[in-house]
Image (cartoon, rainbow, N blue to C red):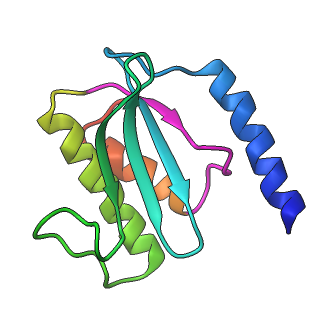
Amino acid sequence: MKKKQDKRIRLKKKIRAKIKGTSARPRLSVFRSNKFIYAQVIDDILGKTLAEANDLPRRAEPGVKITKGTKSERAREVGRMIGQACLQIKINKVVFDRNGFKYTGRIKLVADEARTAGLKF
């Protein structure tokens, strides 16, 4: 099991060497665990997280609970939430960072839903 995680971390380093988030075009980083999914919009130059969304029951946005539904449905909701959060702070374009994960399944669902919310990448 350790080999699979090592491979993902190796891929992550290769991806991060090529992409940087700037103020004009921050980085949309997606992390997937076995239970939850997290998305952050990061300005690498300032080292700041500009927006974040996840499906944790205790850390969701105030008034929004995403504890119900399948993991895929929750991933779509996280994508929609991160897209709306970016548009509220006037961010239209981002660089997508899949964090070493394959672009399929829940990672793809977050990206597609963020695109339909209005983000361009």
Q: Position of residue 24 (x, y in %)?
A: 32, 14
**Residue 107 pos. (x, y %):** 53, 55
- The residue under the point 25% across, 54% down is 81
Q: With 18 as the anchor, is 56 left or right in this view?
A: left
Residue drawn at 52 percent across, 20 percent down: 20
Residue 108 placement (x, y as % from top left): 52, 53
Q: Which of the 4 image quarters holds residue 17?
A: top right
Q: Horizontal placement of 18 versus 14: left or right?
A: left
- Mostly what secondary structure, the magenta segment? loop
**Residue toward you, 14 or 117:** 14
Q: Quadrant of the N terminus?
A: bottom right
Residue drawn at x 27%, y 54% is 80
- Classify the position of the C terminus by image quarter: top left
In the rendered structure, which segment of residues is drawn in magenta? Answer: 92-105
Q: Is 36 rendered above or below residue 70?
A: above
Residue at 15%, 32% in the rendered image: 89
User: Would you place residue 52 above or below residue 43 in this image?
Assistant: below
Is residue 67 visible to the viewer in this orientation of the structure? yes
Instruction: Please tell me whether residue 32 belongs to the stretch shown in magenta.
Output: no
**98 and 59: which is toward the camera:** 59
Position of 63 relative to 88 (above/below): below
**Residue 42 lies in what quarter of the image?**
top left
**Residue 93: within the magenta?**
yes
* Image position of 34 (left or right of 13): left
